[in-house]
Amino acid sequence: MLLPYYKQGLIECGCDEAGRGCLAGSVFAAAVILPPDFSNELLNDSKQLTEKQRYELRPIIESSALAWAVGVVTAEKIDEINILKSSILAMHRAIDNLVIQPEHLIIDGNKFTAYKSIPHTCVIKGDGKYMSIAAASILAKTYRDDYMRDLHKQFPLYNWDVNKGYPTKKHRQAILNYGVSPFHRKTFRLLRDNESVDKK
């Protein structure tokens, strides 16, 4: 059973990211402020839901939330500053775009860089514990999946409509066969140790 808040009586915002472990594409993050009385039996960590359930929940979250926003950091920026900093930056960008300023942030995971002067709490596996983080995980995941499907139209060789940029066997085989695209993260281990590819 998900909890409605970490700190009662505050405007609390849940944050989560999607695409951190991918070999290609941007990392996405979402920030969601839910009303105190929000309730939905289906709401859960996005990884525990089917794709159909995630897309059913997205408009419910968007219409019910007091505020929500999505932030994006490109593969190029990920290569420049690393994936952890990029994930946090994506969260900061999502919070930047909220129409309401939160009074407390709850962050999925164990690492975050303070956003302005707003207090924050990191919660390991928070997307399975708190409603607003679960809601953020669903928005981040579905918006990133939409983006990867669009990229697939430009680069169909990598099957991003199916693997969403994650390191599947077929994705790595496509990298080996065709090389890297402009959207691959060049600082990531794109292939296994006994394989090589031109990363230019």
Image: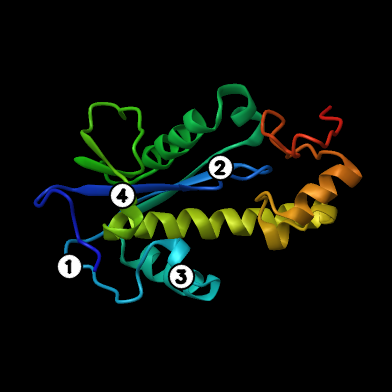
Three-letter amino acid code at the position of disc 4: Gly
Residue at the outermost top position: 80
Compare marks 3 and 1 and give the one earlier in the sequence. 1
Three-letter amino acid code at the position of disc 3: Leu
Q: Are the residues flagged by discs 2 and 4 in contact, CB closer than 8 Å?
A: no
Q: Nearer the viewer, residue 9 or 7?
A: 7
Residue at the image position 82 percent from the left and 38 percent from the top: 180
Kindly identify which residue carries mark 4: 14
Compare marks 2 and 1 and give the one earlier in the sequence. 2
Q: Please provide percent x and percent y for residue 49.
A: 46, 70
Three-letter amino acid code at the position of disc 1: Asp
Compare marks 3 and 2 and give the one earlier in the sequence. 2
| Image-quadrant location for residue 131 | bottom left
Mark drawn on residue 27: 2
Q: Secondary structure at mark 4?
A: strand
| 38 to the left or right of 7 | right
The answer to whether residue 115 is above or below residue 67 is above
Residue at the image position 10 percent from the left and 52 percent from the top: 8
Q: Are the residues flagged by discs 2 and 1 in contact, CB closer than 8 Å?
A: no
The answer to whether residue 112 is above or below residue 156 is above
* Neighbourhood count class around disc 3 (C-alpha, 10 Å): few under 14, some 14–19, many 20 upward: some
In the rendered image, which quarter contains the N terminus? bottom left
Three-letter amino acid code at the position of disc 2: Val
Pair 4/3: label in front: 3
Q: Please provide percent x and percent y for residue 184.
A: 73, 38
Pair 3/2: label in front: 3
Pair 2/1: label in front: 2
Kindly identify which residue carries mark 1: 37
The answer to whether residue 110 is above or below residue 60 is above
Does the image show residue 102?
A: no
Mark drawn on residue 127: none
* Neighbourhood count class around disc 1 (C-alpha, 10 Å): few under 14, some 14–19, many 20 upward: few
